[in-house]
Amino acid sequence: MTTDRRKVVLIGTGMVGMSFAYALVNQGGICNELVLIDINKVRANGEAMDLNHGLAFAKSNMKIYAGEYSDCKDADIVVIAAGVAQKEGETRLDLLQRNTEVFRSIITPVVKSGFDGIFLVATNPVDIMTRVTFELSRFGAAKVIGTGTSLDTARLRYLLGDYFTVDPKNIHGYVIGEHGDSEFVPLSQVMLATKSVAQLLDDKRNSYCREDMVKIEEQVRTSAYKIIEAKNATYYGIGMAITRIVKAILGDENSVLTVSAKLSGEYGGNDVFIGVPSIIGRNGVKEVLELSLTQEEMEKFNRSRSVLAESFNGLNL
């Protein structure tokens, strides 16, 4: 990867991909070259034009254009936001299989271009598709990342900040596991600044209670369903989450983000890609942080891990 030029390639110019691109342009200074690739080349061109016309209002200059897979050769990051929607009556495994074929048609030419950067996957089900990317690309695990539970964690911090009436930035906690129905909040690890939230809940001098935490966790888990019910899709939040991960990589921040990363013995697991707090820097996943989970939390994590392993094992790669 080059260090003097920060080049990002986005594959898939749907609502998620373009929400990311829009956030990237507006935050400014994260990268200076953005390539848009889509099977619909006319759309990719139109999106590039639209973004370029707003550059005069942006914080920094950026080269934006519609490109080809050959443009991935010298890219630092390839973001994949492409995929197919679930058909009526189609099983989740059928959808996974179709998306696997879409990814095969993407990853093969990206790798053939000479790309040696980092894959960042946003396509759902993101944990499975990240593992598919790993298997198809044969890249090192550190260089294949999924958005994981990064957005779920942001939702959690927002809701807890509202509950405790503090800035969400002062809430330190994570949603881990599958980005889906088996994800959960390890409450034992949640902190308000340096104060354990579990201790706050057990303090009889205030009105906080564990039942409210259960409700908040359920809100986090079902937020996407409610948004989809209201507006058919979710894209702003995940677009900003992708931007945050890209910023951490290109800025070599060594920031802790809950991405979909490969377990290599952490939490007693191997092979599976799952949402866990990880240190993210210029070379991708620097380290998976292993939280000190309670026995009950570890059981939840293992159930989530099993869901992902079963889904992946049903695929025909």
Image: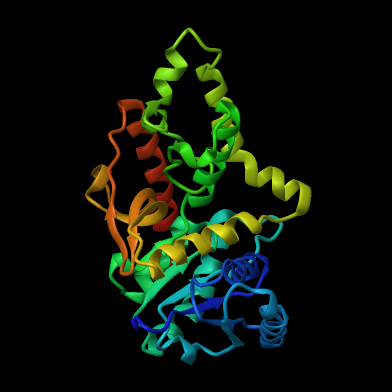
Task: Indicate left or right for 127 with 28 as reference.
Answer: left
| Closer to the camera in the image, 197 or 232 | 197
| Closer to the camera in the image, 128 or 195 | 195
Residue 175 in the image: x percent, y percent?
46, 41
Using the rendered view, name the quadrant where residue 108 is placed. Answer: bottom left
Residue 92 in the image: x percent, y percent?
57, 54
| Closer to the camera in the image, 112 or 30 | 30
Residue 197 visible here: yes
Task: Indicate left or right for 306 with 104 as reference.
Answer: left
Vertical relation: 7 (above or below) 91: below
Vertical relation: 264 (above or below) 198: below
Using the rendered view, name the quadrant where residue 102 is placed. Answer: bottom right
The furthest residue to the right: 230
Residue 183 visible here: no
Quadrant in which the C terminus is drawn: bottom left
Report the residue at 36% width, 77% height from top.
117
Report the residue at 39% width, 18% height from top.
199
Residue 153 in the image: x percent, y percent?
49, 44
Using the rendered view, name the quadrant where residue 295 is placed. Answer: top left
| Closer to the camera in the image, 247 or 153 | 247
Vertical relation: 274 (above or below) 6: above
Residue 186 in the image: x percent, y percent?
40, 33
